[in-house]
Amino acid sequence: MAVCNVCGDLICEECVQKRIGDYAGKLFTIANCLKEECVAASGWAQVVNPDYQRLTNMDWSDSVDGKVLRTTGAGAVLMMVFELIFILGMLYIQFFTQWGLVRSNVPYFFIRGDAVVILGILGNLIAAILLQTALQVYIHERQLASGVMLLILLIVEVMLLLERGFFFNLRYYPYPYLVPVLLAAFGSASLLVFIGSAVAVAVGYEKRKQLREARKILGLASK
Amino acid sequence: MSDMADTIFHRPRGLRVIGITQMSFGIFSIIVSLGIFSAWLTGSPLIPTVGHLYALVIMIFVGIPCLVIGNYVDDLRRNAVIAQVLYSIAAIALVSYFIVNWGIQYHWAVPWFGLVTDVAVGYVAALVLFTQIVFVLYLLVRWKSVVPAKGVRIERDRTRARLIEYGLMPTPLSTDLLGSDGRAVVTKEQGQRIMQTRKVTSEEGMAILCSNCGGATPLTKAEADNTIRCDFCGVRLALSGVFMPCKNHPEYLAAAACAVCGERFCRRCLTAQEPPVDVKWTGSTVFLCSKCFEGRFRPAVTTASLVIPIDQLFSKAGSRFSRFGSLYGRFLRKYFGIMPYALRIAGQALSSMSHSSHGNDNAGAFILAIIIAIIAIPVVTGIALLLGAIVIVPILFYAGLVSVTVEAVRIIRRTDFISLDQARERAVIRREPVKEKESGLRAPSRSWQRSDAKKESAAAEGFFRR
């Protein structure tokens, strides 16, 4: 039972036509009766297919999606924190240690610290994009794409970090624990993101298959 | 029971200033009093015998009254405002007498703890005279808005006042359930029974929920004139519209349809959102079910819509650099604007210098100094601004990234889903307003609870709000 959004008449389950329309960027549902003028006035929204909705119900993934969100999210936050600390640590090394004051140890382009700031901001930027993608990973429609995107970003981030380590000659830093500690922190964050994104890809692929099958069963044209 | 009420948010700003100033005077006086007393204890030669009396007088006649009256004035209390006017008049008379007899230049070496401070007591008296005159004039001119009328109840608890302002509570009067006469408050036990009954399935089928007490009365009891009498509080309710069961709880009537999925839900299952979609929707509440609220299947208005504003961070950093540039541009315009006058003065100095002995040597050095200064000032300023920008802008950018991380942690920890039913029960029944857990990165929901709402700025127009 519903009320027609055009004429306001009371309509029974059999005579109701539900539609989903994009109203200023948001998807809203409206109901209309089968009178010609009401159907015409509701034409801006697409008719809902209840069978399709039933077949594409993804409640089964609620639990795993929550875990994926938290795993990737924790990894991405850890990565972000790592990047934020890394840039500060590098600035400290370059400006406040005897070792860092030697240009051949920590190189720079024009003025002291420029390479650290530029490469650090680049790393932070990638970490921020990673974090944003990690927060999108539990949405059914974006899960597969987000998982794949996370894997790609993770590879880029790892390569950039290793490149920065070599560029700043951190292997030769006199304090022997720096590199292992950095690698351990970064490695654990990467592992979390990797596990989360791998599961997201797997679950996202299942959902994609479910959508395809639903379209096949109902004889709908795939997008 | 009075039917006139208002909240502390309608306190005039001037009254707040007076209250805080008086309290500051009070705290300052107490510190002074303690200092003098301490100096007397340690045997300061400046106040050998009567030091403790000075301290006592300052404490009793200035410190404590200022603190107490200021505090109550700040609370928008009728008697406090009257006391403030009387106190201010007394202070004006006393201070005027002091200035007339001792003059404004009067100084006094005040012993304070281990120190001796030379206080310009005459100026302090003038300051007190000025502020108290302003206070009295303000209070008398705005008497109607600063003195609540007799019998008006002011809600001073900011949390409850905020709920009233946003319409979650109809008045600051009791939120208890009312009896069938519409005035008598039902007992606590009766109230609990009603709230419990509202939640159980009506054995007689679908029920209507009373707008007064929330009790469930079966629709089978509807009368011929299409009304129904609430089984619990006796209020007569009109039956109209369509009765739909909740999708999740068929035993309840649906309150509204979810705007996203279109299904009908009861109050327990719905959330209220105020999405800033466009002009038409601004300020209008949209009801969403919990699933659509979380935006998992069809991104609606919340978590799923989150986009970390990386572009904003960069554009802000860029605009800050350009702001430094425009600042420098303005400086240059002003600089070259005053140059003709500076050059004219320099020319006059130069001509007077050239008439004196050794004039040519001095003039040459002077010209050189002027040229260097003219060129050096904008260059040095430019370098300073550039260095400032290079240091400040990355720090602000970094701070932006830190705040993004903090927001992300909040989102990952939990979503801020809360049903209307939970919110109502906490706020109205248990009187525990729901805590705000909004993310700063997305459009606010439950805006009626926003703690940053500045309601104090609203003009005070008497005390006639019901």
Image (cartoon, rainbow, N blue to C red):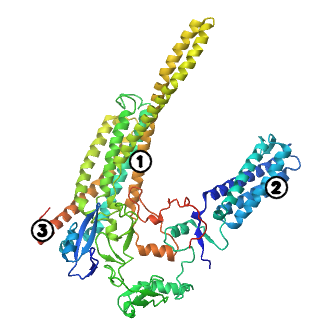
Compared with residue A157, is residue A64 higher up or lower down, i.e. above or below?
A: below
Q: Nearer the viewer, residue A163 or A17?
A: A17
Indicate the position of residue A146 as horizontal and vertical percent values: 25, 56
Q: Tell me: B122 left or right of A150.
A: right
Same chain? Circles 3 and 1: no
- Is residue B115 among the parts visible in the rendering? no
Q: Nearer the viewer, residue B228 or A190?
A: B228
Same chain? Circles 1 and 2: yes
Compared with residue B24, is residue B422 higher up or lower down, i.e. above or below?
A: below
Indicate the position of residue A105 as horizontal and vertical percent values: 36, 30
Residue B56 is marked as: 2
Compared with residue B109, is residue B225 higher up or lower down, i.e. above or below?
A: below
Compared with residue B396, is residue B82 higher up or lower down, i.e. above or below?
A: below
Tell me the SS state at disc 2.
Answer: helix
Sequence-wise, the earlier of marks 1 and 2 is: 2
Residue B385 is marked as: none
Structural distance between the alpha carbons of marks 2 and 3: 91 Å
Indicate the position of residue B325 as horizontal and vertical percent values: 42, 34
Structural distance between the alpha carbons of marks 3 and 1: 46 Å
The answer to whether marks 3 and 1 mark residues whose Cβ atoms lie closer than 8 Å is: no
Indicate the position of residue A109 as horizontal and vertical percent values: 34, 29
Mark 1 belongs to which amino acid?
Answer: Gly
Which chain letter goes with mark 1? B
Question: For the view shown, which residue lies furthest in the right direction?
Answer: B49
The answer to whether marks 2 and 3 mark residues whose Cβ atoms lie closer than 8 Å is: no
Q: Which residue is mark 1?
A: B400
- Is residue A136 among the parts visible in the rendering? yes
The answer to whether marks 1 and 2 mark residues whose Cβ atoms lie closer than 8 Å is: no
Structural distance between the alpha carbons of marks 1 and 2: 53 Å
The quarter of the picture where residue B186 lies is bottom right
Mark 2 belongs to which amino acid?
Answer: Leu
Q: Which residue is mark 3?
A: A220
